[in-house]
Image: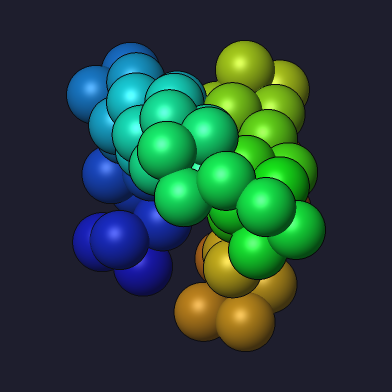
Amino acid sequence: MALARFMASTAGRLLRIALGIVLIAAGLLIGGPAGWVVAVIGLVPIAAGAGNFCLIGPVLGAPFKGSDVRR
């Protein structure tokens, strides 16, 4: 649950967005079809951070929405 609380925090959300940007940059550097796949995968943590949801939250027994974790 501690990981879910961190991911719901501002720092966790910014970390996910930064990770997504790094994945997109890496994908563009790799190039080709594999690079595009990596770049598209980078959109997932950006969307999760911006939308304040955690895809692994339910797996960890935590809520999907970050606002529910902070209650």
Q: Decide: is 28 above or below 10.
A: below
Q: Indicate the quadrant containing the N terminus: top left, top right, bottom left or bottom right.
A: bottom left
Q: Is residue 37 visible?
A: no
Q: Work out whether residue 5 or residue 48 is closer to the camera in this orientation and state it.
A: 48
Scheme of image coloration: rainbow
Instruction: Tell me what residue is drawn at x 75 percent, y 58 percent.
Output: 33
**What is the total number of numbered labels drawn onto the structure image?**
0
Residue 43 place in picture, x, y as percent: 68, 35
Q: Work out whether residue 65 or residue 16 is closer to the camera in this orientation and state it.
A: 16
Residue 30 horizontal side relative to residue 6, left or right: right
Q: Decide: is 53 above or below 37.
A: above
Residue 10 horizontal side relative to residue 59, left or right: left
Residue 43 horizontal side relative to residue 66, left or right: right
Residue 22's quadrant in the figure?
top left
Q: Work out whether residue 37 or residue 42 is closer to the camera in this orientation and state it.
A: 37
Instruction: Tell me what residue is drawn at x 43 percent, y 30 percent.
Output: 25
Q: Is residue 51 visible?
A: yes
Residue 54 place in picture, x, y as percent: 61, 50
Instruction: Tell me what residue is drawn at x 34 percent, y 26 percent.
Output: 18
Residue 29's quadrant in the figure?
top left
Residue 25 horizontal side relative to residue 9, left or right: right
Instruction: Tell me what residue is drawn at x 30 percent, y 61 percent.
Output: 3
Residue 6's quadrant in the figure?
top left
Q: Decide: is 61 above or below 51.
A: below
Residue 50 place in picture, x, y as percent: 62, 17
